[in-house]
Image (cartoon, grey):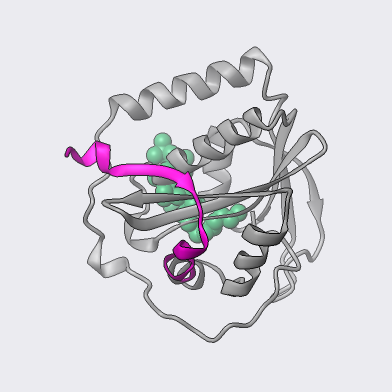
Amino acid sequence: MSARASLKVRPMGVGDLPGVQIIEHASFSTPWPAHAYRQELEGNRLAHYLVATLNRAIVAYGGIWVMVDEAHITTFAVHPGFRRRGIGERLLLGLLDLSIARLAREATLEVRLSNLAARRLYEKYGFRPVGIRPRYYSDDGEDALIMTTPPLAEPEMRDRIAELRAALDAGPAPSPTADASDIGDAMVPEDAEPSEARS
Ligand SMILES: CC(C)(COP(=O)(O)OP(=O)(O)OC[C@H]1O[C@@H](n2cnc3c(N)ncnc32)[C@H](O)[C@@H]1OP(=O)(O)O)[C@@H](O)C(=O)NCCC(=O)NCCS
């Protein structure tokens, strides 16, 4: 099997939660506990979560709530040892495909003002700043930037998505080996509830 063939994006299941928790705790200052994800998967009809796997190991995950005609990205993270390899892009494409399949008119999210890596990723995929939620993040009171796509069905977005997907397909496959210097593997006690979306 080629390295490219080993990167998959598929729906998240309850059995994926230990892998998701490792990335969650390595990525967020107020991680959602496993039971919050379980509730999302088993009890929230609006929620759809995906994982990206490399050689079957979970390297990224993200989710949306589809509310009326809007897809709200609730969470989104790539394992620290696997960043800057296009995995975030593959996952975002998966969430946008899912949003379109669920007939969402547009996609929206909140992101920390200081999170330039995520903001650049979202901008690349057509999200634009549309407002601020002051003191949105409960741990440090940072503001959230609200970012929204143009209508997903419009040629501007369809062409952008098609071009970016083609560029990824033409590029090198992500290496299945982690950057050993950048692997966050700490598991900490369950704590915060998902009172706010991080994406
Ligand atoms: C943001 C995040 C998901 C990006 O994932 P990734 O797999 O590293 O991203 P990709 O390799 O697919 O990068 C795609 C684009 O994102 C942007 N990007 C990603 N990391 C970046 C960085 N460190 N600095 C600047 N731009 C960055 C670039 O535009 C990049 O495109 P380019 O390669 O053409 O420059 C990852 O850094 C992460 O998990 N961060 C912690 C959790 C988080 O912040 N989640 C978002 C919550 S809103």
Find out whether residue 29 is within the magenta segment.
Answer: no
| Residue 116 shows up from this direction | no
| Residue 130 shows up from this direction | yes
Residue 151 position in % (x across, y down):
72, 24
Q: Is residue 173 left or right of residue 101?
A: left
Above-or-below relation of 159 to 111: above
Residue 191 position in % (x across, y down):
63, 82
* Residue visible at 62% across and 58% down in the picture: 41
Looking at this view, is 160 or 6 the one in front?
6
Residue 69 position in % (x across, y down):
79, 33
Q: Classify residue 75 by image quadrant.
A: bottom right
* Residue visible at 73% across and 48% down in the picture: 46
Report the residue that reaches farthest toward the top.
155
Residue 18 position in % (x across, y down):
44, 71
What are the residue bounds of the magenta stretch? 1-21
Q: Is residue 157 left or right of residue 7?
A: right
- Number of labels in the image equals 0
* Residue visible at 32% across and 67% down in the picture: 182
Above-or-below relation of 23 to 147: below
Q: Is residue 175 left or right of residue 167?
A: left
* Residue visible at 45% across and 62% down in the picture: 16
Find out whether residue 7 is within the magenta segment.
Answer: yes
